[in-house]
Image (tube, rainbow, N blue to C red):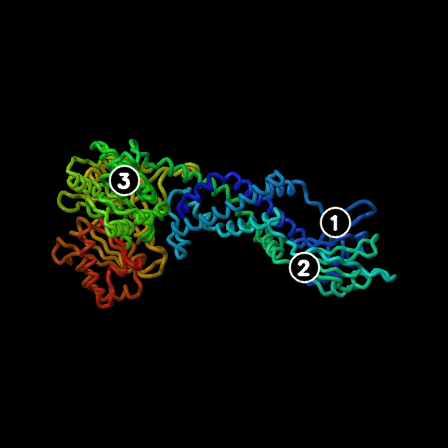
Amino acid sequence: MNMGWKAIHRWLGLTLGALALVLGLTGALLAVDPVQQAWQAPGAADDLPVATVVQQAERSIAGIEELRRLPSGVVAVYAFDGDQARAVRIDPTDGAILGPYQPSALPRWVKNLHRQLLLGDAGRWGAAATALAMLVLSLSGLVLLLRRMGGWRHVAGRVRGTLAQRVHVVSGRIVLAVLLLSSATALYMSATTLGLVELDAEPEPEVASVVNGQPDIAGARIALLQQVRLKDLRALNFPDAADPEDTWKLTTSQGETWLDRYSGEVLATQPASTAQRLYDWALLLHAGEGAWWSWAVLLGLTGASIPLFWVSGLLIWWRTRQERPRIAGNSPLAQADMLIFVASESGSTWGFAQALHSALVRAGHRVHSAPLERFGLGPAARQVFVLAATYGEGQAPAHASGALARITALPARDIPVTVLGFGDRQFPAYCAYAEQVDSMLRERGWPVLLPLERIHQQSAQQFALWGEALAAALGEPLTLDLRPRLPATTALRLVSRQDYAGREGQPAAILRFTWPALSIWERLRGRGLARFDAGDLIAIVPPGSPVPRYYSLASGSADGFVEICVRYLPGGLCSTWLLGLQPGDHVPAFIRENPGFALPASRRPVLLIGAGTGVAPLAGFIRRNERRVPMHLWFGARDPARDYYFRPEIERWQEEGRVASVQTAFSRVPDGGGYVQDALRRDAERVRQLVSQGALVRVCGSRPMAHGVAETLDQILAALRLSVAQLKARGRYAEDVF
């Protein structure tokens, strides 16, 4: 779809949200009625013959015109007492009158508002259009839900993000199927009301009772009424006393039957049409009439949840709109010599596009920036840049799903097109979409100024290095001043620190922070920290720098604190500042999810491999291992006296069974065991055994360390005909490297 499911979902929600709100709330109110009627209905036996009910009713009430069984189980009798019409509820077992049957004015008004918006036929068309919009809105929501959660297998997984995002996704996950069903049934019922679908396939037959001078047969003696059970009855119309040719008319879910008033013989039958049967099911599923009372309650809760959807969706849209970068000095396509096209799912890649755009403008160029799906060339174009993020398992961002087809349709020109990819190395499909775009461009003959470069986790440093290469290739000075548009930060307060000597001149510390309590409304608006788990990243913005630094978290939201392990880096602006903090000091920070590194809910064994401060997220996994999943830790450092981070906690967790085994290696002490790779080699047989049992592997540390671990594991797993690449492809191996 050219427009994209996200855009469809967003604009339908914004434009028709108010009408959907009215229909949802009125639907919730109407769902109470079937429940109330079900409670009022006597507990009659379902197998009670209709003939018996007729006999009991005639003993109590004279002048009966119609006996009706409502979907709720209530039996109503309509009769004339002289010239006065009356409607009463009866007990079908003995015919006792239970009270008048008269729906109150309020339910009728609510039903009128729900079905036609108090506008007559025009309102019916409006309600039908809203039902169609709700159906499309629900379908698009389902597509987006599956994309966000990573498919059907993960649809029940933990939801991340702001409170508004979690409310929107979790509530949607619970009631989305009901909303889809409700929208579809409402659309069908509207079609029947508007005459677009005819319920009666054929006209009623012309029948008449045969007048033979005999008296009317008693309803209790009619054979068919003795056979039909009360549970199957819709309505029974009695013959008019003033019309000797009038008949009995029996209506069930199967259709209509006309009976001779004198003999009780069947005069004609007319089965229910397919359209009528569908309508009956639609009414049952949409209104809960005739269903279990629990279904009506579920429908009511679903309708009541629509305001929650609407408000949370509005807040998500508003926050996204506020965070969207606005590129100044964007030249028209026809006048620009430099073109930048962007594919971004979350919008973060636009910050890099903005930095590139500004740098080129400062260098004297006319620059045009646009989404990738608008790819095109103007007469003045000299260079083209594509900044492409990868979404999900190698797909294009939703808005750019049709971009490749558009680019392929254009003839290749002698204008260089340079692709810059954005992604996360721990995903098997790292920058896969950017690679796809670049490969297609080269196959079609487009020249290139710079080869494909990949930016890991939005690294400002990598982007700056790419900018230097770009300046050299263009032969002109060019400085990429990346000032990312950051999410709102929260002031974290340092509550404790645990200091370590570390290597010479490079101390380290475990820092623990808390965050301020916020109201529900503030959290819905996206204030405060987003929900996080161990292995996610905390972004800290040091004084004097617009670029955040990221640290792996050793704690989750459920722990009630933020904990990181920081080592001093010579010349490091952020590490120097953090290590100088004292309890009570504050730091601005926000959460960035790291879902590829998270551990899924599973009983499979886990291999945790880390070195130095890389043990922090692994410690967080162990801390939250309340189910006692078999976790095995391999940890490498220099000196147990100087940089064995979390040692007391790890030893306590081992006693508690949160970690099954701990193997250490210290490279700078005699008999320390070398590096963490050496510890793995010594445990090669156990590593193979655990991996053959389906173990998950998580590695955290420096890039050289992660590379060495991968090489070692490749050697160990060769006997199983497995490799790290294969484990990554199966989602069993992930790295968090720095």
Tell me if 359 is positioned left or right of 8 in this view. left
Q: Position of residue 31 (x, y in %)?
A: 59, 47
Secondary structure at numbered mark 3 = strand
Occupied quadrant, residue 687: bottom left
Task: Indicate the amino acid at tag 3.
Answer: Ile
Q: Which numbered disc, 1 or 2, marks the residue closer to the eye? A: 2
Task: Indicate the amino acid at tag 1.
Answer: Val
Residue located 46% across and 47% down the image: 171
Residue 649 seen in the figure: no
The residue beneath circle 1 is 88
Q: Which numbered disc, 3 or 1, marks the residue closer to the eye? A: 3
Secondary structure at numbered mark 1 = strand
Mark 3 vs 1, N-terminal side: 1
Mark 2 vs 3, N-terminal side: 2
CA distance separating discs 1 and 2: 25 Å
* Residue furthest right in the image: 213
Instruction: Tell me the number on the disc at residue 255.
Output: 2
Instruction: Tell me the number on the disc at residue 340.
Output: 3
In the rendered image, the vertical position of residue 690 relative to residue 498, given as above or below: below
Residue located 77% across and 52% down the image: 65
